[in-house]
Each structure stands twice: as C-alpha cells, then as structure tokens.
Image (cartoon, rainbow, N blue to C red):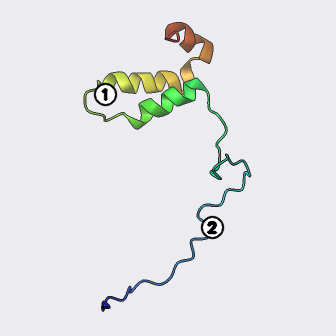
C-alpha cells in the first residue's frame, strides 16, 4: 500500500544546525555553556517571568531593575542571604 502525498517543500540542508564553534562538549556530545553568576541566573529567571500569573508584576519589575545593574553581587548577597 502506498500513499499519494508528495512533500511540496524544497530539501533543506540542516547539517550545520547542531554545530558549535566553541569546541566544549560534554560526554553526550552536547555543547556546554560557560557558567553564569548567581546574579545573572536570578535576573534571567525574573526577566523570563515578568508576566507570570500569580506574581506581583510591579514587584518582579522592581527586582529585575535591582538585579540588572544597580547593586553589586555582595550587596545583593547581604540582602538575600543563601538559604
């Protein structure tokens, strides 16, 4: 049994999609990004959740501004000690 469908799109060469020029890979062959600071991690989490339901948007906006550039890592650590 055969079907009559023919894909109308042109063939796309995707052989370069997974390439990484940095050369750092883990044991599974996936590229490894350099580590980021705790401050940058917190900022990215806040920035990605600005419109998340259940969060106070004004509070998230204030924290995004605070973690973006205003305070040093030491000032933030003193205000938000590790759990």
Residue 76 to residue 11: above or below:
above
Task: Give the SS element for disc 2.
Answer: loop
Label 1 sits on residue? 57
Tell me which residue sits at (31%, 35%) in the image.
51
Q: Is residue 68 left or right of residue 23?
A: left
Q: Which-is-in-front pick, marks 1 and 2?
A: 2
Between 27 and 41, the one nearer to me in the picture: 27
Q: Which mark is residue 10?
A: none
Q: Which residue is mark 2?
A: 16
Crowding at mark 1 (Cα within 10 Å: few <14, some 14-19, many 20+): some
Can you see residue 66?
yes
Q: Position of residue 61 (x, y in %)?
A: 38, 27
Residue under the image location 72 percent in, 47 percent down: 24
Q: Which of marks 2 and 1 precedes in the sequence?
A: 2
Residue 72, can we see it? no
Q: Quadrant of residue 13?
A: bottom right
């Amino acid at each position: 049994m055969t079907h009559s469908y023919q894909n109308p799109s042109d063939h796309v060469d995707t052989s370069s999609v997974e390439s990484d020029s940095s050369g750092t890979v883990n044991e599974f062959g996936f590229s490894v990004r350099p580590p980021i600071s705790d401050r940058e991690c917190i900022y990215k989490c806040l920035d990605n959740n600005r419109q998340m339901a259940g969060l106070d948007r004004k509070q998230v906006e204030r924290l995004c501004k605070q973690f973006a550039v205003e305070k040093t890592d030491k000032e933030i650590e003193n205000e938000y000690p590790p759990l």
